[in-house]
Amino acid sequence: MIEVKSLYKSFEDKEVLKDINSVFENGKTNLIIGQSGSGKTVLMKCIVGLFRPTGGEVLYDGRDLVTMNKQEWKMLRREMGMIFQSAALFDSMTVLENVMFPLDMFSRDNYADRVKRARFCLDRVNLLEAQQKYPDEISGGMQKRVAIARAIALNPKYLFCDEPNSGLDPKTSLVIDELIHDITVEFNMTTIINTHDMNSVMGIGENILYIYEGRKEWQGSKDQIMSSTNERLNSFIFASDLFRKVKEANK
Amino acid sequence: MLLTKSVATFGRYLMLMRRTFSRPERMRMFFKQYIKEMSQQGVDSIGIVLLISFFIGAVICIQIKLNIESPWMPKFVTGYTTREIMLLEFSSSIMCLILAGKVGSNIASEIGTMRVTQQIDALEIMGVNSANYLILPKVLGMMTMMPVLVCFSIFSGFVGAYATAVIGHIITIDDLTLGLQHEFNEWYVWMGFIKSVFFAFVITSVSAFYGYTVEGGSVEVGKASTNSVVSSSVLILFSDVLLTQLLS
Ligand SMILES: Nc1ncnc2c1ncn2[C@@H]1O[C@H](COP(=O)(O)OP(=O)(O)OP(=O)(O)O)[C@@H](O)[C@H]1O
Ligand SMILES: [Mg+2]
């Protein structure tokens, strides 16, 4: 479980995040949604510790990230996996080497066990046959899946995804979403996903946090989102014709 | 304004170097990278070093023999001057200047690309000290290989000089050999090695710094690569003056 308490973040004199409070539970897919530029990426970077918040607390199962010492911080990072918007695979390594990298770096297992674990993760994302290819030889959707395999290699307790299906077609997005959801449930992880894809929201949104200009505007599940009366949320979600029609049909 | 900016940049450079020079997380991974960098930056540069040094050695020999030598100069002057120029300046300093273009731009664009495609962030999230993992093998690898490259350069320069004797017949082989062996001072070779190791550090660390601190997209990577070559070249020239004075 990750808890965010009155989190503030500003760059020079520009306040990007203002007083964010939220709880992200484990075994659930937590979504952060909001317009482009609303501060989703900044919030996620504050949570994972790539940015230092200007104020507030980020609690990982009670452990505060901001006041943590170096050793605790180091241990915590081994429990985190992250999938970046651009997949961020190491392009000088093959797919298998990419997945093996965190194991090579931190695992005490011998070589055979490490290969076995990497193969298991690749198999979990259905990419075992591409293991000897380089990242630029596989499609964007496959790269994302490799990134997922790499992120779960060390059995993380916390999984972060920054726009996991940007630049993918709806069908592939669905595959990625379901994969992330299944893995979250299977390994009981705390998963936080940044997205502005409404299909993901309706598909896997178990806990949705809507950010508007750096403030928390609304929080709830995908079942509540349809009946919400929040003006700003509605204008965000029903910006698309399709969803407006769905809503009208539901009435 | 410019002064405070330079001091700030130098400070950030020192902070990056402090992160770079720490004990690697996994020695096994470090040695793997170290060997890879030695081959990529060092071994792959042998060709260009041999080529350039061969022609420079030949040209120096021709210039001195045909344009400078006069009847009242002893016969060994040509070989002697060729040797001293190669040992003292060309093979250690000018060669490093040329390699700053090749190796420096390569390192800056490689690390810069990793920065803008978030590969460095990915390393940090995993808990890897990215500066240490990426930069240290490059710096140490190049510092190991540079003296070897200097050896190749000196050797190739002499071969070039002999080529003018054998092919061009502008000087007899005996005169050239006499000159190359005249009053040889071993310290000059060591001086070349010391300078080149220092320059190797300058080239790799400065260009890694430029690549590591890229912000933005591919345009910035290009700029960083250019800046790294310019800065490391200027630094090499400056420190060349100081080191030469210091070591002579
Ligand atoms: N390193 C930074 N320095 C200064 N300002 C920044 C920095 N990173 C982000 N910002 C600002 O913070 C605001 C929020 O940016 P952020 O990247 O979080 O948006 P986002 O919600 O992720 O948008 P998108 O959906 O397009 O990815 C933007 O106005 C941006 O200019
Ligand atoms: Mg974003």
Image (cartoon, grey):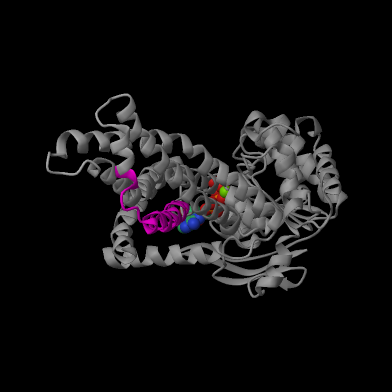
**Vertically, is A11 above or below B216?**
below
Q: Residue A172 is drawn in which quadrant? A: top right
Residue at image x 46%, y 34%? B47
- Find residue A142 and report its horizontal and vertical position in percent: 71, 33
Using the rendered view, name the quadrant where residue A209 is placed. bottom right
Q: Quadrant of the N terminus of chain B?
A: bottom left
Q: Is residue A155 magenta-colored?
A: no
Q: Is residue B190 magenta?
A: yes
- Residue appearing at x 42%, y 36% in the figure: B50
> Is residue B56 shown to the viewer in this render?
no
Q: Is residue A130 left or right of residue B34?
A: right
Q: Relative to A242, is B140 above or below?
A: below
Residue shown at 34% from the left, 33% from the top: B162
Could you tell me if residue B177 is visible in this image? yes
Residue B122, image x, y percentages: 63, 51
How many numbered discs? 0
Left or right: B201 with respect to A191? left
| Image side of residue B112 versus residue B22, left or right | left
> What range is drawn magenta here?
B179-208
Magenta residues, dominant SS class: helix
| Quarter of the image where the C terminus of chain B is located | bottom left
Residue that extends furthest to the top in the rendered view of this protein: B167
Q: Is residue A251 above or below residue A160?
A: above
Q: Quadrant of residue B175?
A: top left
Q: Position of residue B141 (x, y in %)?
A: 55, 51
Give percent across and percent down for residue B245: 28, 64
- Name the foreground residue: A40 vs B2: B2
